[in-house]
Image (cartoon, coloured by chain):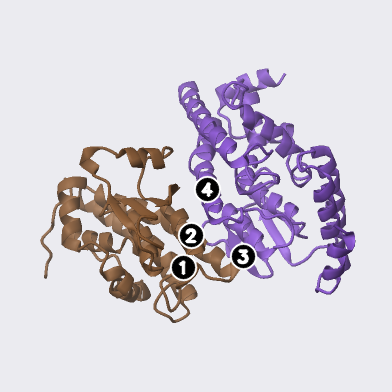
Chain colours: A brown, B purple
Amino acid sequence: MAKGDVKLLGTWASPFALRVKIALKLKSVDYEYLEENLRGGKSELLLKSNPVHKKIPVLLHGDRPVCESLVIVQYIDEVWTYGPSILPSDPYDRAIARFWAAYVEDKVWLSMRAFMTANDEDARVEAVAKFKEVSVLLEDAFVKSSKGKPFFGGDEIGYVDIAFGAFAGWFKVIEKALNVELFDEATTPNLLAWVVAFLAHPAIEDIIPSTDKLLEFATNVVLPSIKAVAPASQ
Amino acid sequence: MSILSFVVPTIFTQQNAQSVARSTCRSLVNLFVPPYKYSAVFSHQRAFHDQCKMGKGDVKLLGLWASPFALRVRFALELKCVDYENLEENFGAGKSELLLISNPVYKKVPVLLHGDKPISESLIIVQYIDEVWTDGPSILPLDPYDRAIARFWAAYVDDKAYPYMRAIITADGEEARAEAIAKLKECLMVLEDAFVKSSKGKPFFGGDEIGYVDIALGASMEWSKVIEKAFDVKLFDEETTPNLLAWIDVFLAHPAIKDVMPTTDKVFEYAMNFISPPSKKAAATAAN
């Protein structure tokens, strides 16, 4: 697909935009990336393309906009049918993948925001506990979905890997900034390994923003209240 | 086009005689009956539905009669003529063992059990039904872009319309209720616009036939009527949502919907359990 036919409106730090970038990369789709300037106000193109939510990411295929990151990922999977399949081919496996992606959507973002708005140690401890509840369920889902392979999608990155893994950079930020462990050998050993495998995947490693850059962004732009806590050991 | 050109090829597939008859009749109707002559199409669909319920298969639905989420699944199953056993949860007695095993994450209805495989979350179940039972009308559009638009609007219904409906019913105080009503009406105006674009002059979001967004939104229509009745408010009107106003009637009259949708009165009585006391008085007055 020639460049110019496909555009992505996004912001570099957004995990939602990252989901779309990952899907496009997996399918080897050429596209033009348009960075929305958060400080400059929303662009005319964004407001025109997503008048309902006025949010990124928006995929423009030709002049047709597709909105909502997981809707876009499914669209990409259905249009570019060569290359690896993002959703499983079996309808039941697809339903399971959609279930867990929806679960990620409902729970993960909220629990991450709990970290970001935690003002004291008690709130942080509670945020960790809430995240653990979520991650333990996803650990179990991973074991069932992956069937011993490195990803939720099996041998290759799939829908849930993209939905959940797009937050991986932000997991690292939270761990570094708050000196906490979001995944551990005791409760989520498979997810611990999965994060490593995910971040090392060729479709991911080049496009995921660095932890330092994200941390700087979180510290200076998004959440002035996050304090970069000096870890016990570096 | 001869009837034989439809019937003969299908005889040599593995379809049974009933489904041959169904697809033949459907093809004939599509030839001779303009799709939007509702009464003719609906009577034909009723004939199909009478034929297709032949004993229970290995499909069960755990649901609640009043739940719009469970209704979505029932609509999809009815549209596809799937034999299923409808298992009514009795929340008064506590959640059943089967529900807790089948949906351990959320412990909520609806859950579809296909064989021993549980599928949860109403819109996920509807997509599953669409992908498994491929004879019969397509619930999601065939074109990927149209599918993306349908998914977008179904998500909008879930993220905006339903929460506002819930907020209206459970609002603590008239001010909170009025605010929720205003927000819902804004949503419905957005959906009116979506309907015009999606339907392209046809009766449903899905076009000639009920589709994904019809199911997503339509399942809440009795609750909308309850809201209108209980709080003496018009959610849909000729001025702001003329197309949706027409759509509601056509949707509720469709055979796949009509037999399954509970009556307004029944839902109204049930809704009284959730409406806070001062409004109950007003609601009771409105009902009389």
Label placed on residue B118: 3
Whether pointer 2 and pointer 1 mark residues with C-beta atoms closer than 8 Å, the reply is: yes
Label placed on residue A74: 2
Residue located beneath label 4 in the image: B149
Residue located beneath label 1 in the image: A86
Tell me the SS state at disc 4.
helix
* Tags 3 and 1 on a common chain: no
Tell me the SS state at disc 1.
loop
Q: Residue at coordinates 25% horizontally, 68% vertically from top-left?
A: A206
Quarter that holds the N terminus of chain B: bottom right
| Residue A202 pos. (x, y %) | 30, 74
- The alpha-carbon separation of the residues under discs 3 and 4 comes to 27 Å
Is disc 2 surrounded by few (<14), some (14 to 19) or many (20+) residues within 10 Å? many
> Label 4 is placed on what type of residue?
Ile
> Label 2 is placed on what type of residue?
Gln
- The alpha-carbon separation of the residues under discs 3 and 2 comes to 22 Å
> Label 3 is placed on what type of residue?
Pro
Chain under numbered label 2: A
Chain under numbered label 3: B
* Tags 3 and 2 on a common chain: no
Q: Nearer the viewer, mark 3 or mark 1?
A: 1
